[in-house]
Image (cartoon, helix red, strand yellow):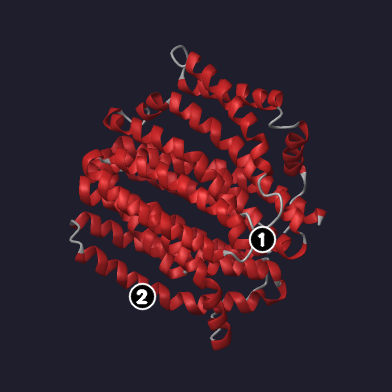
């Protein structure tokens, strides 16, 4: 059991480091896009990505989650599970591609938007199979390869984007940078399967295995479809109701909030296979692990909300004066950030403990709520209306998730005991940031705020010396395959 705890800490640390670098690079080229393209073309670009991101779930239909869970439980059957998943996903990829093409033509999007969608389809298909290949590595409790690849992928996009702008290329060529990066990621993940896990990469056409995989994936599929629609449908609705400019403005808070979620993503990548094992073998350890994830999620998200609210104006100004309308949407989305962070371990717990149906039901309720609220609020308020919807629906998702999780393991609410201490530390940091903002550069204020917050966490007891040492030691441990 201690070895598994070590793997969680090690995987979280390395994957977190990779995600930090990845998100920094991503924000760099996004800032470049925003400044060069302007809100209208930026809106078209991310509309195309949003559309293909929604449809991508129909290729995977939750199979990657099943693959990770089953490989974690039965490593000796990894080859059979991988082959079965490939046999299902290949025809689904063809059908989904045709569906995307039909969809954008029926809705009558302009030619440029259609072309961007067609190019994005290539990345959609490649990325879906890459996720499958890395799902095997996650099942073997290894995130090292995925961590390395994520940084390289973002670096490829940045370098190619700089070349596109240098030679006067347009938004179409920027979309090709995604295709190039996705191609590398696909080849690398395929190489990892062959070289390190020694697994054959070929479809396994066995009816009994395919039927079993589809049955196991069905709850994940429902959740995945609802979740993907929930995340990206606001961009699609905003584009149709308020136009490309409003869509481009909304991408500022959307991208910033998305970039800040690297830590809960790292937690879940490491926690999910471990929680699956703890559910079978040690319910008390399951509860301890979940509470730590919730506590750390609160520690990270609350200062981002408070500090981000204070420095929202100078942050938006970085993208150019064309995006001043993004200040209040950003502030509203920052309020939703703690709910987003807490939602990751809750959703992972339910999936790992065979409560996928509860996750699916909750996400369906939230999706319907989101669609209704967006249709009501976007026409009069534009991007602000979409942001208000984000706050309310994320809070609803956390509430529904906690209600579903209370029966899984004992003592799932211990993290709430330290929640007040974390809020106090965040408020102390927020006051310091607010006082310094008029006199210092925004990046200097952020650095000082982070140092103040770390000290406040220690003084309030929300973070202990043992917690800090655990993270540091996890980086020093020698990684294993």
Q: Residue furthest right?
A: 2
Query: Relative to the observer, which residue lies in front, 186 or 251?
Result: 251
Q: Nearer the viewer, mark 1 or mark 2?
A: 1
At a point 37% along the width and 30% down the height, the residue shown is 316
- For disc 1, the marked residue is 273
- Residue 95, numbered circle: 2
Q: Is residue 198 left or right of residue 439?
A: right
* Residue 471: x %, y % from top left: 72, 40
Q: Is residue 452 visible?
A: yes
At a point 68% along the width and 31% down the height, the residue shown is 462
* Residue 65: x %, y % from top left: 56, 65
- Residue 329, numbered circle: none
Q: Is residue 379 above or below residue 300?
A: below
Query: Relative to the observer, which residue lies in front, 189 or 128?
Result: 128
At a point 26% along the width and 44% down the height, the residue shown is 378
Circle 1 residues within 10 Å: few <14, some 14–19, many ≥20: many
Query: Relative to the observer, which residue lies in front, 110 or 66?
Result: 66
* Residue 387: x %, y % from top left: 36, 41
- Quarter of the view holding residue 29: top left
- Quarter of the view holding residue 203: bottom right
At mark 2, the secondary structure is helix
């Amino acid at each position: 059991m201690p070895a598994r705890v070590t793997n969680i800490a090690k995987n979280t640390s390395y994957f977190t480091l990779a995600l930090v670098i990845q998100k920094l690079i991503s924000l760099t080229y996004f800032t470049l896009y925003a400044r060069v393209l302007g809100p209208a073309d930026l809106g078209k670009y991310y509309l195309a990505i949003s559309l293909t991101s929604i449809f991508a779930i129909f290729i995977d239909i939750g199979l990657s989650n099943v693959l990770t869970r089953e490989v974690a439980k039965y490593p000796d059957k990894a080859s059979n599970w991988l082959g079965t998943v490939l046999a299902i996903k290949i025809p689904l990829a063809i059908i989904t591609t045709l569906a995307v093409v039909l969809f954008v033509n029926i809705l009558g999007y302009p030619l440029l938007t259609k072309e961007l969608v067609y190019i994005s389809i290539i990345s959609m298909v490649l990325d879906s199979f890459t996720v499958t290949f890395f799902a095997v590595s996650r099942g073997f409790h290894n995130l090292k390869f995925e961590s390395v690849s994520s940084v390289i992928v973002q670096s490829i996009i940045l370098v190619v984007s700089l070349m596109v702008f240098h030679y006067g290329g347009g938004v179409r060529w920027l979309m090709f940078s995604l295709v190039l990066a996705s191609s590398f990621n696909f080849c690398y993940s395929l190489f990892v399967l062959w070289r390190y896990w020694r697994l054959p990469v070929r479809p396994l056409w066995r009816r009994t295995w395919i039927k079993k995989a589809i049955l196991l994936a069905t709850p994940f599929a429902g959740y995945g479809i609802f979740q993907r629609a929930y995340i990206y449908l606001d961009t699609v609705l905003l584009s149709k109701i308020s136009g490309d400019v409003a869509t481009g403005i909304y991408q500022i808070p959307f991208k910033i909030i998305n970039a800040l979620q690297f830590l809960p993503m790292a937690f879940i990548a490491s926690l999910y296979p471990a929680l699956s094992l703890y559910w079978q073998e040690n319910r008390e350890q399951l509860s301890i692990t979940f509470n730590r994830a919730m506590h750390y999620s609160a520690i990270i998200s609350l200062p981002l909300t408070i500090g981000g609210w204070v420095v929202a104006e100078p942050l938006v100004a970085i993208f150019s004066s064309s995006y001043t309308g993004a200040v209040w949407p950003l502030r509203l989305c920052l309020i939703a950030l703690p709910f987003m962070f807490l939602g990751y371990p809750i959703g992972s717990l339910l999936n790992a403990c065979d409560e996928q149906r509860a996750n699916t039901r909750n996400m369906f309720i939230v999706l319907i709520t989101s669609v209704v609220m967006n249709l009501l609020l976007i026409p009069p308020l534009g991007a602000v209306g979409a942001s208000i919807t984000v706050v309310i629906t994320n809070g609803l998702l956390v509430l529904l998730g906690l209600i579903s999780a209370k029966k899984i393991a004992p003592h799932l609410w211990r993290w709430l005991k330290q929640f007040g201490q974390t809020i106090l530390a965040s408020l102390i940091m927020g006051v310091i940031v607010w006082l310094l903002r008029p006199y210092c550069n925004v990046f200097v204020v952020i650095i000082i705020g982070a140092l103040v917050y770390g000290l406040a966490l220690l003084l309030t007891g929300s973070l202990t010396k043992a917690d800090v040492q655990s993270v540091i030691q996890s980086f020093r441990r020698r990684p294993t395959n």
